[in-house]
Image (cartoon, grey):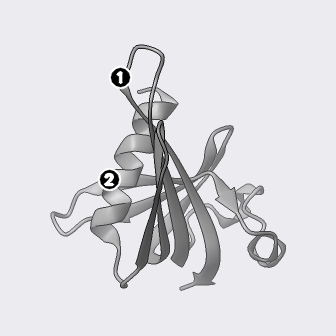
Amino acid sequence: MNAKKIMLISGLILALFSLSSFNSAMVANTSETVVAQEGLVVYATFDGKEDYGYNFIATGKDGEEHMLTFQQVEEDVLSAFNLNDNSLVGAKFKITFNRDLKLSKDEDNMDDEDEINTITKLEKL
C-alpha cells in the first residue's frame, strides 16, 4: 500500500476514533479548500517512525486494528517523548492532535487530497 493511501485511510480512521469535540474551519479559494480540525483525541499504541511519519495502532469499535500516521509532532512533545527512537515502540498513549486537510484539483481536474496530522499533546498510559 503506498504512503498516500495509508495517509488517506489513516485520516478516515482518525475521524472515526475522535473522542472529543473539535472546531472546524473551512477556507476556500478558487482551487482549494482547507479543513482544519483541532483537539482531536485518540488512544493508540506507538508502532515506530517511518520516512512518511509516526505510526500508531488503534483498535476500533469493531475490534479491528488500524494504523494511524502523524506527519508532524510539536517540538515540546518530541522533547518529552523521543518518538525518533524505538524505545517507545509498544507504549500506549492518549494522543491529542490537529488535522489539516487540503482539498484541491490536480492538473487533470481530479480531486486531490493532502492531509497533515500533527500531534500537539501526548500522554503515556
Q: Earlier in the sequence, mark 1 or mark 2?
A: 2
Amino acid type at circle 2 is Leu
Q: In this view of the protein, which residue sits in the foreground, 53 or 125?
A: 53
Give the residue number, with chain letter if any, for mark 2. 12
Q: Position of residue 88 (x, y in %)?
A: 67, 66
- Quick one: label 2, few (<14), some, or many (20+) residues within 10 Å? few
Give the residue number, with chain letter if any, for mark 1. 110
Q: In this view of the protein, which residue sits in the foreground, 114 or 28?
A: 28
- Classify 19 as above or below 83: below
Q: In this view of the protein, which residue sits in the foreground, 87 or 56?
A: 56
Residue at 77% from the left image edge and 55% from the top image edge: 84
Q: Position of residue 5 (x, y in %)?
A: 40, 33
Considering every residue shown, the one lying at the far front of the view is: 30
Q: Position of residue 64 (x, y in %)?
A: 23, 57
- Classify 7 as above or below 107: below
Q: Position of residue 72 (x, y in %)?
A: 67, 57
Considering every residue shown, the one lying at the far top of the view is: 108
Instruction: Say what secondary structure mark 1 lies in.
Output: loop
Instruction: Say what secondary structure mark 2 lies in.
Output: helix
Q: Is residue 84 left or right of residue 13?
A: right
